[in-house]
Image (spheres, grey):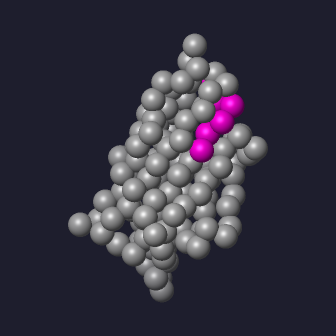
Amino acid sequence: QVRVVESGGGLVQPGGSLRLSCAASGFTFSLYDVDWYRQAPGQERELVATISSAGDRRNYSDSVKGRFTISRDNAKNMVYLQMNSLKPGDTAVYYCNAYRRVATVKLVYWGQGTQVTVSS
């Protein structure tokens, strides 16, 4: 059974830090690239960070560059998002997305999301 489960969200004060985790099972995780997305109320889902299957390529949106770090541990089937210097504008539900392309087919697995609230 394929599962992607995010955890680590919560309430944090501005300037604080959180580390989100994404646990995958039921598929060969090490073959999949992984994205972290976020969606705030009334807004479109935004791509925040991307990491390649081997972990050797990473990209970030301009809104989080220099504050967030994406990493992965393929031995544990885990991806992490370290979030520092958090701002109220980072408040959103954060989603993990694992994907790979096989010929013309794109395999995509989403988690259920974890809420991050940045507020004093």
- The residue lying furthest to the bottom in this view is 103
- The residue lying furthest to the left in this view is 1
- The residue lying furthest to the front in this view is 75
Q: Is residue 89 visible?
A: no
Q: Give how far across and how far down residue 22 sits, in percent.
A: 44, 53
- In depth, the one of 52 and 78 nearer the eye is 78
- The residue lying furthest to the top in this view is 120
Q: How many marks?
A: 0
Q: Is residue 51 visible?
A: yes
Q: Quadrant of the N terminus?
A: bottom left
Q: Is residue 7 left or right of residue 45?
A: left
Q: Is residue 109 left or right of residue 94?
A: left
Q: Is residue 63 above or below residue 26?
A: above
The magenta region covers 82-89
Taking the spot 54% from the left edge, 68% from the top edge, the residue there is 33
Q: Give how far across and how far down residue 112 sits, in percent.
A: 35, 46
Task: Using the rendered view, name the quadrant where residue 29 is placed.
Answer: bottom left
Q: Give how far across and how far down residue 96 sits, in percent.
A: 46, 52
- In depth, the one of 45 and 35 nearer the eye is 35
Q: Is residue 119 above or below residue 80?
A: above
Taking the spot 33% from the left edge, 65% from the top edge, the residue there is 25
Taking the spot 53% from the left edge, 52% from the top edge, the residue there is 80
Q: Give how far across and how far down residue 86 sits, in percent.
A: 64, 30
Q: Is residue 109 above or below residue 54?
A: above
Taking the spot 59% from the left edge, 73% from the top edge, the residue there is 54
| Residue 79, magenta (yes or no) | no
Q: Is residue 13 left or right of residue 114?
A: right
Q: Quadrant of the C terminus?
A: top right
- In depth, the one of 57 and 106 nearer the eye is 57
